[in-house]
Image (cartoon, rainbow, N blue to C red):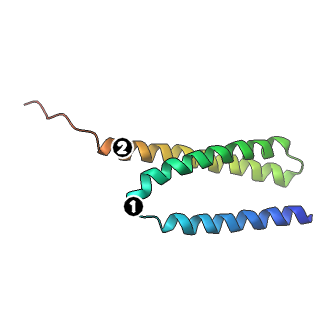
Amino acid sequence: MNPDTISNLFVFLLATFLGLEVIRRVSPLLHTPLMSLTNAISAIAVVGSLIIAGRSETTLSGVLGTVAVAASMVNIVGGYLITYRMVKMFKKREPKKP
């Protein structure tokens, strides 16, 4: 393994642990606005991971790029589904007809 790959993996692991720690400490009241922000960040991550997966200089970079694309897309779709569900909770409901 070359030093650049080890350095990139170290940055990836550090960012993962830091991101988990930051998200875990968020108040539930801020969940929906934060979800919108993370969807935007994940969209940027999808573009970057598509570039990495498409370039695929080594097998490892191709596999990691593909995993990154899948993880980012799951995050985006899940974020939008959760945000839609939370916004739906605040809509007025029509009274039931007898």
Label 2, label 1: how many angstroms apart (C-alpha)? 14 Å
Residue ranking furthest to the right = 2
Q: Residue at x 71, y 42 (%)?
A: 47
Q: Secondary structure at mark 1?
A: helix
Q: Give residue 28's mark.
A: 1
Instruction: Report the label total.
Output: 2
**Which is more toward the observer, 20 or 56?**
20
98 in relation to 22, above or below = above
Q: Residue at x 52, y 63 (%)?
A: 23
Residue 61 rendering spot, x and y as whole percentages = 82, 52
Q: Is residue 62 left or right of residue 70?
A: right
Q: Give residue 4's mark.
A: none
Q: Secondary structure at mark 2?
A: helix
Report crowding for label 2: few under 14, some 14 to 19, many 20 or more residues within 10 A (C-alpha).
Answer: few
**Which is more toward the observer, 98 or 16?**
16
Q: Residue at x 84, y 66 (%)?
A: 6
Q: Is residue 93 left or right of residue 1?
A: left
Residue 40 rendering spot, x and y as whole percentages = 58, 45
**Which is more toward the observer, 4 or 78?**
4
Q: Is residue 15 left or right of residue 57?
A: left
The amino acid beneath tag 2 is: Val
The amino acid beneath tag 1 is: Pro
Which mark is first along the chain, 1 or 2?
1
From the image, which quarter does the C terminus lie in?
Answer: top left
**Which is more toward the observer, 53 or 37?**
37
Label 2 belongs to which residue? 87
From the image, which quarter does the N terminus lie in?
Answer: bottom right
Report crowding for label 1: few under 14, some 14 to 19, many 20 or more residues within 10 A (C-alpha).
Answer: few
Residue ranking furthest to the top = 97
Q: Residue at x 89, y 48 (%)?
A: 57
Residue 22 rendering spot, x and y as whole percentages = 55, 66
Residue 80 rendering spot, x and y as whole percentages = 48, 43
